[in-house]
Amino acid sequence: MSEIYPIARGLSPLIIITISLFFFEENISSHEVVGIFLISLSLIIYGLKQFLSRDSSVKGFSLAIITGCFIASYSIVDGYGARVTQNPIGFYSTMTLINGLIFYFYAKWKDRDIIKRIFISGKRSFFIGGTASYAAYGIVVWACLFLPIAVVSSIRETSILFAILLGLFFLKEKINLIKSLLIVGLCFGLLFLILLLSIFLPIFLFFAPTSAYAIQGGLDLSSAQTSVGKRFAKVFCDAKKEGLDSEFASEYALNNTYLKFVAFPDDDQYLDDLWEFTSNNILDSCG
């Protein structure tokens, strides 16, 4: 597991970002690409180190690659399914019911008494574990409305940090050099994805509000045009091509860009220039 899991989890964001860029033309900024690669490569290198140090078979490595492809495929399906339906919880719930029904018949076919044993000896694990799993992945699918799927997938894979910390504090496991490098790589990846900024910004605002607001107000117009204007225009036009009217296309684009999370400067001319840039992009792309 310590060999296959990190490789599979690290490979999936790389597959997702490749498909997103070349087939879905999703707008992913350069700093997001750097963050995704840092997180993915950290996990893959950690898994390869475990693989080489134990002289494991090539079969395990092959299975890790296949698993990574499956993780990437269901992540893309779930992410775009949430965007198309604009109802991530409803979409995920429906998919969960379908999957549950399929696995129920499969389990009954393999072992007729397995359901009875679950409710006799595994009832607590079934309900608590199942509820936690449903809630956790439901949040992941919901996040795909607001962030690129590759970004969401990368942040999700950093859960291994919590596994390492749990092992350190509760199982008294030691942190060796390779684990330390993994932690550093994951943290720098998160930093590039601006996750740490969103965590520490409220603290920074409390201690130095004037400086923080100055940073927020200094958002460069060119950066805003690239990260917000172009992204909004593309998503809006994609929604229009799918048959949505302008009102629903605008709402769809709003839910699939960073517009809700950007602190723009209090400058009417700045906002007018940004909106003019965005409008021109919409007119050029879809009229």
Image (cartoon, grey):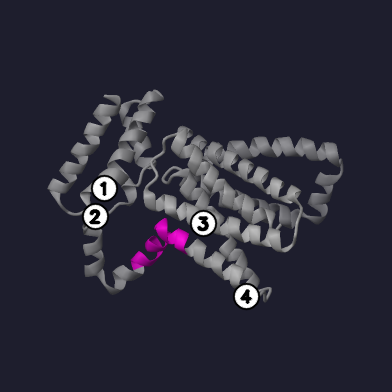
Image: magenta residue range: 188-202
Find residue 219 and name its label: 2
Packing grade of label 1 (10 A; few <14, some 14-19, many >=20) is some
Find residue 256 and name its label: none
Q: Which quadrant of the figure has residue 77?
A: top right
For marks 1 and 4, the one nearer the N-term is 4
For marks 3 and 4, the one nearer the N-term is 3
Packing grade of label 2 (10 A; few <14, some 14-19, many >=20) is some
The residue wearing badge 4 is: 169
Find residue 108 and report its horizontal and vertical position in percent.
Answer: 82, 38
Report the amino acid beneath label 2.
Leu
Q: Is residue 239 above or below residue 129?
A: above
Nearest to the eye among marks 2 and 4: give it: 2
Find residue 113 and report its horizontal and vertical position in percent.
Answer: 86, 44
Find residue 39 and name its label: 3
> Rounded to the nearest whole Å, what is the CA distance between mark 1 and mark 2?
7 Å
> Rounded to the nearest whole Å, what is the CA distance between mark 3 and mark 2?
26 Å
Report the amino acid beneath label 4.
Phe
Where disc 3 sits, the SS reads: helix
Task: Please say whether residue 135 is visible from this viewpoint.
Answer: no
The residue wearing badge 1 is: 224
> Rounded to the nearest whole Å, what is the CA distance between mark 1 and mark 3?
25 Å
Marks 3 & 2, CB-CB < 8 Å contact: no
Q: Is residue 107 left or right of residue 128?
A: right
Where disc 1 sits, the SS reads: helix
Report the amino acid beneath label 3.
Ile
